[in-house]
Amino acid sequence: MIDSANSKTEPLSALSDPPRMIRVLAPSSLPPGYELHVESTESEGFTVIVPQGGVREGDIFLAPIPHGYKMEELTDVPTGKWKDGICDLFRYGVCQPALFCAFFCTDIAMGQIMQRMRLSWTGNRTVGGRALNTFRTVLILCVCYGIFDTALGVYIAASMNVTENGYYYYYVSNVSPAIPIIRNVVGVLFTLWSIYALYKTRQNVAQIARHTGDYDRNQGLFCSETGLPAHVAFAAPMTV
C-alpha cells in the first residue's frame, strides 16, 4: 500500500508542455538522422533531424520546433470548406473594398489575394520574401495589357472598311430571312452566357477574398498590396 501522505507528486502545471510540431516536406530522399535546414516564409530557418527509417522525396514528416523559436503569425483560415456561402456577397456592405475590386478590378483583387497568401504571380508557393513583389508584378501586367488592348482596338477600328463590312451584312441578310433570326438568337444566348461567366468569376474572387481575410476585425483597403492593413498577419498559402 502506498502512503499518500508521504508520496510526492508534481503538480500538472509543473510538467513541461509537449513541443510544438511542424510538418516538413522532404526535398529528396534522406537517411535517418540527417540534419535538414528548413525555412518557413519570412521566419529564420532552423535545423530538423530526419526520423528513423528515413524519408523519400515528397514525404511529409513531423519535426519539433526549437524552444523559443518564433514562427510567423498567420491568419487562421479554415481549410476544406468555405468560411461563408455564395449568398454572403454583401456581408460587409455594397461598397466594401474587396467586393468592389473583385467586380471592377478582378485581376487587381487576385493580385492582392496572391500577395496575402504568399504566392508568386504564377500561383506557386514562395519561400522568404519572394512573394513581396507579387502584387506589383500583377499590377504592371494589367496596365501593360490594358495599354496594348486599347492600342490594338484603335488600330483595328481604323483599318476596317466600314462600307464593305456594311454591304456584306446587308447581302447576307437578304439571302435568307432565317439568317438574321439565327444570328440574333445566338447573339442573345452568347450575351447571357458572357454575363453569367463574368458574374461567377467575380463572385468567386470576392469569396476567396473574404475567406483569406478577417474583415470582422480588419478594415479592407483599396490601396494596399494585400487589400488589408499592413499589420494584419498573412494567410497560409494554399488554404482555399
Image (cartoon, rainbow, N blue to C red):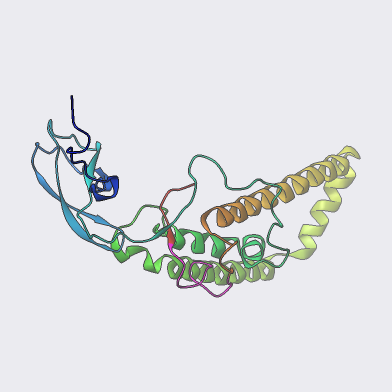
The structure residue drawn at horizontal position 21% and vertical position 47%, both measured from the top left corner, is: 64
The magenta segment is 221-233
Classify residue 158 as left or right of residue 177.
left
Name the residue located 41 percent from the left edge and 55 percent from the top edge: 122
Please identify the dominant SS of the magenta region.
loop
x and y percent of residue 18 in the render?
25, 45
Closer to the camera, 188 or 158? 188
Q: Is 11 or 59 nearer to us in this picture?
A: 11
Left or right side of 163 for 22: left
> Does 161 sit left or right of 238 as displayed?
right
Q: Looking at the rendering, which quadrant does residue 150 occupy?
A: bottom right
Q: Residue at image x 26%, y 48%?
A: 17
Magenta segment includes 139? no
Q: Nearer the viewer, residue 170 or 38?
A: 38
Where residue 240 appears, as percent x and y from the top left, is 49, 46
User: Is residue 16 toward the left or the right of residue 124 in the image?
Assistant: left
Image vertical order of residue 42 relative to residue 199, above or below: below
